[in-house]
Image (cartoon, coloured by chain):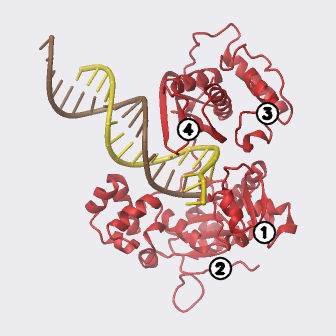
Chain colours: A red, B yellow, C brown
Amino acid sequence: MSRRQFAAPTRSGDDIPDDTGCTILHVDMDAFYASASLIERPDLHGRPVIIGGGGNRSVVLSATYEARRFGVTSAMPMARARRLCPQAVVLEPDFPRYSQISDAIMATFHSVTDIVEPLSLDEAFLDVGGALRRLGPPTGIAQHLRDTIADEQSITCSVGVAPTKFVAKLASSLAKPDGMIVVPQAEMLGFLHQLPVGALWGVGDRTEEALVRLGLRTVADIAHTPVETLRRALGQASGSHLHDLAWGRDERTVVRQQREKSIGADETFAHDIDDPVAIHRELLRLSDRTAARVRAAGMMGRTVSIKVRFADFTTITRARTLRDPTDVSQEIYATARSLFDALGLQRARIRLVGVRMEGLVESEGAPIQGLLDEPDHGWREADRAVDQASARFGAGAVRPASLVHEVRNGGAGRNQRAERGPQGSRGPGPRAGRPPASGPA
DNA sequence: TCTGGGGTCCTTTTGCCC
DNA sequence: TCTGGGGCAAAAGGACCC
């Protein structure tokens, strides 16, 4: 194995890091989507590869380190990435595959400790405090995880080992790729204070600008600034939080997976559109998709919110809280559409629309209210039939009539992403068991 | 250069009730 | 009857993360 170990800092005089009290691990896969895609394409190893959608408005999801050497970074527009690295091979993302690999990696984490907090498909915090007697010191556990994941998944990862979540996360990012950094308690401040402010978790472009305006460029600068000054510049919560982090104070514990607080879907059009009928159709599709995911999670939501992004990238949101929580596609769509219509837009050019359910509660025990226009065999039963058909024939096997019409006619200029994949791949069928007129009338 | 899609959290504003 | 203020929840916007 060529994986780097114990990259920094170490106890003086030997190569064994002092990991006393470093019970928090942050494990982060290296270029996860790209690495996962290359498992099926070993011929591309060592070459610049970019994972991203084919649409004219897509961005880079992930890139191999060979591509990153040309300046390609994630979230960069694909058009720019292709210009920077024209020889790169571009692959479409394969989310079901990434999910599978992620499940296997999370299972490896759980073989070490049951206190695992996933942050996304490819990274997690682990609290190994309870596993020390059984498995040895934290660095040994971290190395075991790195070896196991490399052997079983052929993907390398980087690990930060520290007394707090925040420092563990910083350490793993500095260890990339394929490395491990241990930050003992005694060396934490020295480690932190040399870093630029942008390294702090929660400091993005805007906050960094605000800090630089105050003349603060390093974490040490923040640490030595009165907390009141930070609060005035960044707000109460952010100011105090950053000051604490700069002194290594981070009381947050590793918490097991939590339930989502919101579920939603949005979509950027391939070209800006101003046709209200096309926008209603998109709201119907997104409401349908969101509702199906809410039901699949065994949840119901009380607040429906929509997002509209205009051609100039300004974005607005509108929300309405219902009397009772719902998971009914039709009710979510009706609310989303009424929120949109209330904007009173006069053919404004729109780039993106989204639908989101908030205020989620477990559907078990949630009050279920009949809808005003509910027929004998209601929307709820119809949704259940749609879910069953989707489970059997694939998502999108059953869809509202207005969307069937749209598929036959080749769509309304949406980004490519939604035109492919499981949706629509089995051909549009009639919406079985669905009450009539579910589309935008 | 021209900006995805999935989320979370924080701040400010607004409206309602007492 | 009108007004003001506190408390609260919802709405809206924005920053941030992967």
Determine whether A431 is above or below A148 in the image.
above
Relative to A27, A154 lies left or right: right
User: Could you give the CA–CA distance between mark 3 and mark 1, rounded to whole angstroms?
Assistant: 32 Å
| Residue A246, quarter of the rendered image | bottom left
Precedes in sequence: disc 1 or disc 2: 2
Query: Which of the pair A120/C13 is nearer the observer?
Result: C13
Q: Position of residue A198 (x, y in %)?
A: 46, 67
| Residue type marked 4 | Ser
| Residue type marked 2 | Gln
Precedes in sequence: disc 3 or disc 1: 1
Which tag is nearer the camera, tag 1 or tag 2? 1
Instruction: Kindly identify which residue carries mark 4.
Output: A262
User: Could you give the CA–CA distance between mark 4 and mark 2, rounded to whole angstroms?
Assistant: 39 Å
Which tag is nearer the camera, tag 4 or tag 2? 4
Label 3 and label 1 in one chain: yes
Determine whether A34 is above or below A365 in the image.
below
Which disc is residue A410 wearing?
3
Q: Position of residue A279 (x, y in %)?
A: 62, 30
Instruction: Kindly identify which residue carries mark 2.
Output: A5
Q: Which residue appears farthest toward the top when viewing the image?
A: A376
Q: Is residue A132 visible?
A: yes
Q: Mark 4, chain letter?
A: A
| Residue type marked 1 | Gln
| Residue type marked 3 | Gly
Instruction: Kindly identify which residue carries mark 1.
Output: A87
Q: Mark 1, chain letter?
A: A
